[in-house]
Amino acid sequence: MQDKSLLKYTVVRQVACLDPTNMFSDPNLCQERMKRLVHRFLQAHQLPGGISAGDIIVQQFGNFLSLEAKSESLKTRLDVFQHGLLCQSYPELWTFCKKLLLLSHGQATVERGFSVNKEVEADNMQEDTVVAQRMMCDCFCLWGGSKSSSDKGDPGSCSFCKISVSATPGSGKEKAGEQCTKRKAEEDLLEQLKKRKMVLAEVANSLEKEADTLAEKAEGKSGTLMAQLITKSNILRK
């Protein structure tokens, strides 16, 4: 989980300077983080205008912290909130913030059609979420999604349509039966895995208690007997 976390990247941690709560509680830290972000973009040659543009961004961010930072709860998305405050008064800063928001998780709609972190979301889903998603996918595959058609004519107006209409019910029933069987097998397998997990947890707790008991007995002993008890306790903990 730690290897996949985006927080291991310095840029991601520094983007926290856009959080209104951090702006109000520690403006000096936010100002320093913004300077580092600008410096990082300059090093990567991702900031049009060079050093002069970076100075303008840092200056506008400082003015924004001193004039606009308030202790208010955030009721809208961060990109919407920042757009209302920065777009008109601080255009260079808003252009830079848009790039930062595109790098942050959950702000993909800043630019229409842009999508990030789908693989990370899928890999880090919890067990119940994966099960619910699979059941929904099976349901859509079985019954189909919503369909809208502008064709109001008779589906049996041609020989091809008649063949399609007559062939659909039978194939649908066969497919439904296969899907139900597959889903039932997966649910049974999931139930077995849950039972195994519970049994392993009980065994682990039992071994842990037994190891604690041996360690407590060893405190009142000495010499070889104490060493034997401690050794048994350590083996159980492994």
Image (cartoon, rainbow, N blue to C red):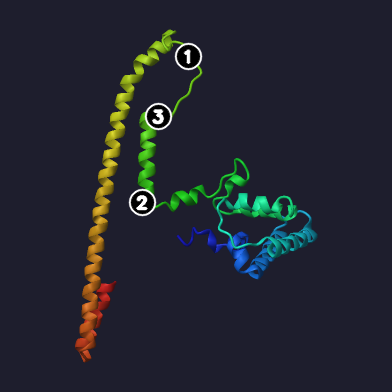
Residue in the picture at 33% in, 24% down: 172
Between the residue at mark 1 and the residue at mark 3, the CA separation in whole angstroms equals 20 Å
Residue in the picture at 56% in, 45% down: 115
Give the crowd class for mark 1: few <14, some 14-19, many >=20 residues within 10 Å: few
Front disc: 1 or 3? 1
Q: Which residue is mark 3?
A: 144
Where does the image place residue 30, in percent across and percent down from the top left? 64, 66
Depth check: give the residue in front, 18 or 76.
76
Q: Which residue is mark 2?
A: 127
Where does the image place residue 80, in percent across and percent down from the top left? 62, 49
Depth check: give the residue in front, 108 or 166.
108
Question: In the picture, which quadrant includes the C terminus?
Answer: bottom left
Q: Which residue is mark 1?
A: 152
Callout 2 amino acid: Glu
Mark 2 in CB contact with mark 3 (< 8 angstroms)? no
Dot 2 or dot 1: first in sequence order is 2
